[in-house]
Amino acid sequence: MYGLSKRWNYVCRTTPGVADRLTPLEQVTRDEFIPAIINRLFSCTDELRNIMALPPRYGGLGIPVMMEMADREYNFSCRATKPLKEAILKQIDNYTEDWRHSKGVKTEITTERNLFYRQKQAEIRQELESTPLAKLMFQLAAEKGASAWLTALPLKEYGYLMNKQQFSDAIALRYNLNLKDCPKTCTCGQKYSANHALICKLGGYVSLRHNSLRDTFAELMRTVKCKDVQTEPVLLPVDGLELPKGTVLGDQARLDISARSIWNASERAFFDVRVFHAPAPSNASKPIPAMYLSHENEKKRCYNARVLEVEKGSFTPLVFSTSGGMGGEAERLVKKLASKMEYHTGQRYSDAVGYIRKRLRFEILRTTVISLRGDRGARKNIVDINSLDLNLEPQGQG
């Protein structure tokens, strides 16, 4: 879609007054293209179409409505090429581009384009006020890092691959659409839905999601030359030390990761991962930033004092949502790892941040879509024998 949209974008930028001629293209996009990528037959509503027209970082899919953007893109193109056009009309042989002027014009155009998308995003959010769950899913889709999977190349080497069903399930999950060909009832007996599948403990998929993210962080730490990287390290015993209420005191208490040379050269840093589902009843009533903060604080109440007082190290909770967003503490670690990656590999910092975000996002996404259709064991049906009619007739004696 990315390459094809650029071709139509070229038409918009070079052809004046073409908007009305693009109506058939929009009709095909609604009736054929979008149902094809979602793998279902349905009528695309205006609300959903407006959302999908936004760039991924604003919560959309980057499938633009060409007839709406045609005139705007043509005007942008005219502004950007005005000096060159004038030079051609005046037949200037030794024309030299003013790079400073060109950069300024491009910056203005980018600013105006982003302002347009932010306004559209705000309008859509306002329209979704009457449907809280749809509004929440739209806000989650616009979180930093949540859309990294949509802009990544499908590189097998890094695991950036999904099959057709996984892709359509990921889109359905992103916009709270009904899943196709799923059971009505979960093995646990509850009514089946995408939201239930992501919090159901049967099948071990909640643990799979957690462990996958834990192992990815440990691998990234080893990649950037951190020392003494361990998964599930056992904490030192408390030995009667008085610690704040709520602290985990068990002798066999473990955290997810420990490593040295993260924040400084010799300090041992401990990390604990949590992946929560925002639409779950325990989270849905909170603002999104408060969700992350709540889970971070809960982890700190359990382990921070023990790590500081007993281990003499540092503790960082790594909180993520199933939609791909991350809390402030996890964001800080990602930036630190990217800085180390830049130093050890020579990779640009921005590229390193992008790479880490994509790795983490695909780990969450892959384990999330697996949990939607993964086997959870045979359902146990308990039958009251007294309610059975065995159609037995008593036999006469004799």
Image (cartoon, rainbow, N blue to C red):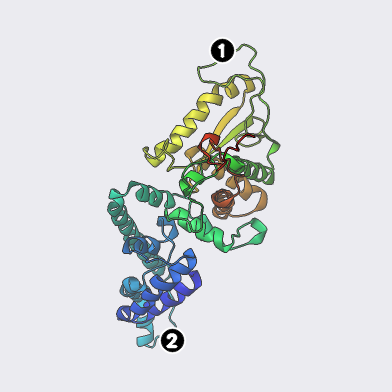
State which quarter of the image contains the C terminus: top right
On screen, 38 above or below 311? Answer: below
Indicate the position of residue 88 as horizontal and vertical percent values.
Answer: 38, 85
Could one spot residue 83 in this view of the protein? no
Indicate the position of residue 82 as horizontal and vertical percent values.
Answer: 35, 77
Q: Earlier in the sequence, mark 2 or mark 1?
A: 2
Q: Return the residue nearer the eye: 117 or 63.
A: 63
Q: Return the residue nearer the eye: 40 or 187.
A: 187
Secondary structure at badge 2 equals loop
Q: Return the residue nearer the eye: 305 or 322.
A: 322
- For label 2, the crowd category at 10 Å Cα-Cα, with few meaning under 14, some 14 to 19 and many 20 or more, is few
Counting the numbered discs, the total is 2
On screen, 398 above or below 66? Answer: above
- For label 1, the crowd category at 10 Å Cα-Cα, with few meaning under 14, some 14 to 19 and many 20 or more, is few
Q: Which residue is mark 2?
A: 93
Q: Return the residue nearer the eye: 166 or 398.
A: 398
Q: Amino acid at mark 1?
A: Glu
Q: Amino acid at mark 2?
A: Asp
Q: Is residue 376 left or right of residue 114?
A: right
On screen, 56 above or below 195? Answer: below
Q: Which residue is mark 1?
A: 242
Residue at (43% x, 75% y) in the render: 97
Q: CA distance from mark 2 to mark 1?
A: 83 Å
